[in-house]
Amino acid sequence: MRNPINRLISIGGLILLLPIGYLMVTGDLTPDQAGIRAGILLAAVIVIRKFVRIGMGVVATSMERQAAEAPKRRATDIA
């Protein structure tokens, strides 16, 4: 988990847990309800992380392909 993108997603997930904790402290939410909401939030964070990972892979692949297709020029070539 040393990837900065994963770290940002994890921090976002922790920030999104704050309203659940607040509702528990004020007594508006039971522990059972909080557990269900936290589980849904965990699943959402995992899905978002997968989509971001796939998106980064697509972008990296297209950049590699674009770099391979670019003509190789020497420093002495005139544009």
Image (spheres, rainbow, N blue to C red):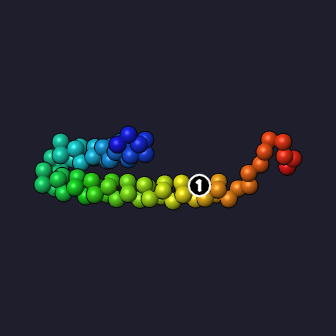
Q: Which of the two residues, 48 or 66, is positioned nearer the viewer here?
A: 66
Residue drawn at (59%, 55%) of the image: 64
The N terminus - image quarter: top left
Q: Which of the two residues, 66 or 36, is positioned nearer the viewer here?
A: 66
Residue drawn at (74%, 55%) of the image: 71
SS for dot 1: helix
Residue 76 shows in this picture: yes
Where in the figure is residue 25, as x and y percent of width and height?
18, 42
**64 sits left or right of 45 in the view:** right
Where in the figure is residue 11, as x and y percent of width and height?
35, 42
The quadrant where residue 37 appears: bottom left
Return the residue at label 1. 64
Three-letter amino acid code of the residue under disc 1: Glu
Where in the figure is residue 63, as x and y percent of width and height?
59, 55
The quadrant where residue 53 appears: bottom left
Q: Which of the two residues, 31 or 52, is positioned nearer the viewer here?
A: 52
**22 sits left or right of 12 in the view:** left
